């Protein structure tokens, strides 16, 4: 049965448990009633919960497809995440309870955070960073990563965080695209007991990054012995974080930022070979993430919140840094893998710190399912009261397992749909109000307006269609760095003459109760283990190899990762298919982009199925990769190509 059929048959429904509902921050269904909640009024009310140094003049200026929120208002994101908590009862509250993969632990109160962020901000200033400059951050999941982001925000520098799993080339391209002046990295980070040599990767990248003037290096390794092997410091360019810290003043006055001043750029994959720099601004983004963190996770003062995402992704930005800290939360931050040293590491952490809110991705949940419940049952998870899911569609089976074995049938699950571009959660249950259904992200957050449309732009009431967002929202991307035309073209041209309709690239279905079921991407973007990867990016990496003449990449269903990467490759004259060449090509992609993009399958083929106009028919390649009967082949230039490929693929399996 296909995923869609499974979803169509899902009838289970879970109302909020009554003891949860009575104490929930939102238990009044009216908050979710679209008609009574005008987006502009709603978001203005939410924005007023932040600390502004100057109030805004206008809530929204909308010249489709460009929106400006809270114009005239001034604020600083680091003040909202740190300074505003140090004068009251949160001063000595734990902000970050951190655990490294090898088992080392550090805790920072809000006062500690204040000191660290001020020092880090002054370090950046000492290296010449001024308001508007771009700073690249390539760090493991250590507290300094959060200090670095907030330090940028404090002085008005624009951070661009690059996930530590990306290759030197990927790092280089991102640094060069937005012209970063400083790079913050570490000698290494831990992953499954191995050291990820970030500084070495960075040095490789920096061979070709003319705009970088300085590199700030955090010493992650615990012993300090043999650091030189992981971090060769280049005189004048490279500086140890812990040394520079001793040379700067302790206080840094926060920069006054306009609401629409840039907060950060985060690169994400699209349908072309080149990742795009998604631009987020200060006032609207902070409003979106602060509000959603509070209501979606029902965050209370005494909660221990844990979002397992890496800061290299938007989930880390919004729900590990800016959202929880703006709300003065106590949160757990963990550096490493869920199965190191044992497959119960996450549950051990939940038990040790009494985690009450837990937010992770379906791919992780499916891995836990496979590992089995004994790893879970060993631990006391009685403090958990709310679970969240993000990043990809969650299949009902994984949802039910999460509900039963992690939530112990007591915790509501919030399945949150959103994107790098939306900045904050868009479609989600409100845990004190919404009856959840396994596999459905349910309904839009208050202040968010969506529609299901067909390709002509007609509204679909019940059934499947393309998801659209019909009203601007504060945390929406403002543009693509350096390419506003691409911004307009990618997100606002799906429906002719409707520059006011944002197209996220997802298909969805609405059921009789008005619930939305996200079906996944309808474009050439893959979602592999919750990571967005463009098929074109992988294809470009493959054709970069001297043996490859042509490559076509598709996603195929995968039990744990959701989607896996299948590549069809035709070789240049003089090269012959072999197992070792297959391994070499897989490594080549990992080297070019990062291990997350390494193809699962590679099939050599003399030809790729093309239409008479020369377009590769990916749809047919997907049929082959997923072992389905072939769809319509009548438009192919040479139908025998695809039949031969299918036989070959099946033989290989
Ligand atoms: C997918 C991650 C179904 C979707 C926050 C979207 C989801 C893409 C969900 C964005 C969900 C995210 N249910 N699909 N709850 N959450 N997606 O930019 O296809 O890394 O377009 O942001 O992930 O991925 P991104």
Image: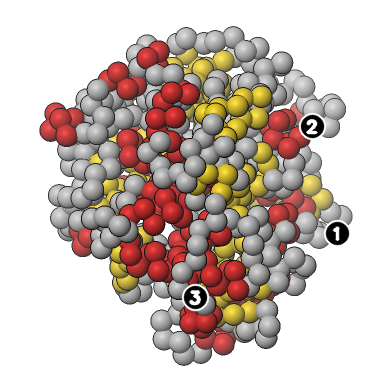
**Closer to the N terminus: mark 3 or mark 1?**
3
**Closer to the N terminus: mark 1 or mark 2?**
1
- Asked if residue 621 is positioned above or below residue 276 in the image, the reply reads above
Which residue lies at the image location 45% right of the left edge and 73% below the top edge? Answer: 250
Q: Badge 2 is on which residue?
A: 615
Q: Badge 1 is on which residue?
A: 574
Mark 3 falls on what kind of element? loop
Q: Badge 3 is on which residue?
A: 249
Which residue lies at the image location 82% right of the left edge and 50% below the top edge? Answer: 549
Closer to the camera in the image, 286 or 449 = 286
Q: Residues within 10 Å of mark 2 (few under 14, many from 20)?
A: few
- Asked if residue 311 is positioned above or below residue 122 in the image, the reply reads above
Residues at badges 3 and 2 in contact (C-beta under 8 Å)? no
Mark 1 falls on what kind of element? loop
Q: Position of residue 209 (x, y in %)?
A: 74, 66
- Tell whether 311 sits left or right of 7: right
- Asked if residue 182 is positioned above or below residue 269 in the image, the reply reads below
Q: Position of residue 95 (x, y in %)?
A: 32, 59
Residue 311: assigned label: none
Q: Position of residue 527 (x, y in %)?
A: 54, 42
Q: Residues within 10 Å of mark 1 (few under 14, many from 20)?
A: few
**Closer to the N terminus: mark 3 or mark 2?**
3
Q: CA distance from mark 3 to mark 2?
A: 60 Å
- Tell whether 490 sits left or right of 376: right
Q: Position of residue 207 (x, y in %)?
A: 75, 72
Which residue lies at the image location 36% right of the left edge and 74% below the top edge? Answer: 102
Q: How many marks?
A: 3
Which residue lies at the image location 45% right of the left edge and 44% below the top edge? Answer: 52
């Amino acid at each position: 049965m296909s995923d869609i059929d499974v979803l169509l048959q899902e009838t289970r429904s879970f109302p909020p448990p009554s003891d949860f509902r009575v104490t929930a921050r939102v238990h009044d269904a009216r908050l979710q009633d679209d008609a009574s909640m005008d987006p502009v009024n709603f978001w203005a009310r939410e924005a007023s919960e932040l600390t502004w140094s100057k109030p805004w003049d206008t809530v929204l200026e909308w010249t489709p497809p460009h929106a400006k929120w809270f114009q005239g208002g001034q604020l600083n994101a680091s003040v909202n995440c740190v300074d505003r908590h140090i004068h009251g009862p949160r001063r000595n509250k734990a902000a970050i309870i951190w655990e490294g993969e090898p088992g080392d632990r550090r805790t920072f109160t809000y006062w500690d955070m204040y000191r660290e962020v001020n020092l880090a901000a002054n370090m950046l200033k000492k290296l010449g960073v001024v308001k508007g400059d771009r700073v690249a951050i390539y760090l493991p999941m250590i507290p300094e990563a959060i200090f670095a982001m907030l330090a940028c925000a404090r002085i008005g520098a624009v951070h661009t965080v690059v996930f530590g799993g990306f290759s030197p080339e990927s790092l280089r391209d991102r640094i060069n695209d937005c012209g970063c002046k400083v790079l913050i990295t570490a000698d290494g980070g831990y992953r499954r007991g191995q050291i990820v040599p970030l500084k070495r990767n960075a040095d490789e990248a920096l061979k070709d990054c003319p705009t970088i003037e300085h590199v700030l290096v955090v010493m992650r390794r615990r012993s300090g012995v043999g650091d030189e092997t992981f971090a060769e410091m280049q005189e004048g360019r490279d500086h140890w974080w812990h040394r520079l810290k001793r040379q700067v003043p302790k206080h840094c006055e926060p920069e006054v930022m306009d609401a629409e001043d840039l907060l950060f750029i985060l690169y994400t994959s699209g349908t072309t070979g080149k990742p795009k720099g998604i631009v987020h601004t200060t006032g609207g983004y902070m409003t979106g993430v602060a509000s959603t963190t509070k209501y979606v996770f029902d965050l209370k003062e005494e909660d221990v919140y844990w979002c397992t995402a890496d800061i290299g992704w938007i989930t880390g930005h919004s729900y590990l840094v800016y959202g929880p800290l703006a709300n003065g939360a106590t949160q757990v931050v963990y550096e490493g893998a869920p199965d190191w040293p044992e497959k119960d590491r996450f549950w051990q952490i939940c038990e040790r710190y009494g985690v009450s809110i837990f937010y992770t991705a379906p791919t992780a949940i499916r891995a836990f399912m496979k590992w089995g419940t004994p790893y879970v049952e060993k631990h006391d998870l009685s403090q958990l009261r709310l679970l969240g899911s993000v990043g990809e569609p969650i299949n009902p089976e994984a949802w039910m397992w999460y509900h039963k074995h992690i939530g112990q049938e007591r915790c509501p699950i919030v399945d949150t749909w959103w994107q790098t571009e939306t900045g904050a959660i868009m479609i989600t249950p409100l845990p004190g109000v919404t009856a959840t259904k396994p596999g459905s992200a349910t309904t839009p957050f208050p202040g968010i307006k969506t529609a299901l449309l067909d390709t002509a732009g007609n509204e679909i009431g019940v059934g499947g269609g393309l998801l659209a967002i019909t009203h601007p929202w504060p945390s929406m991307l403002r543009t693509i760095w350096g390419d506003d035309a691409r911004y307009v073209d990618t997100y606002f041209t799906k429906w002719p003459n409707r520059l006011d309709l944002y197209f996220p690239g997802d298909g969805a279905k609405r059921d009789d109760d008005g619930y939305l079921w996200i079906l996944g991407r309808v474009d050439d973007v893959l979602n592999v283990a919750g990571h967005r990867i463009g098929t074109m990016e992988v294809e470009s990496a493959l054709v970069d190899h001297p043996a490859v003449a042509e490559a076509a990449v598709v996603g195929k269903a995968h039990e744990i990762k959701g989607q896996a990467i299948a590549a069809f490759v035709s070789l240049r004259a003089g090269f012959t298919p072999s197992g070792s060449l297959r391994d070499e090509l897989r490594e080549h992609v990992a080297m070019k982009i990062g291990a997350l993009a390494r193809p699962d399958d590679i099939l050599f083929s003399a030809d790729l199925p093309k239409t008479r106009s020369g377009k590769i028919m990916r749809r047919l390649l997907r049929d082959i990769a997923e072992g389905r009967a072939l769809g319509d082949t009548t438009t192919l230039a040479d139908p025998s190509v695809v039949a031969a490929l299918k036989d070959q693929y099946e033989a290989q399996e």
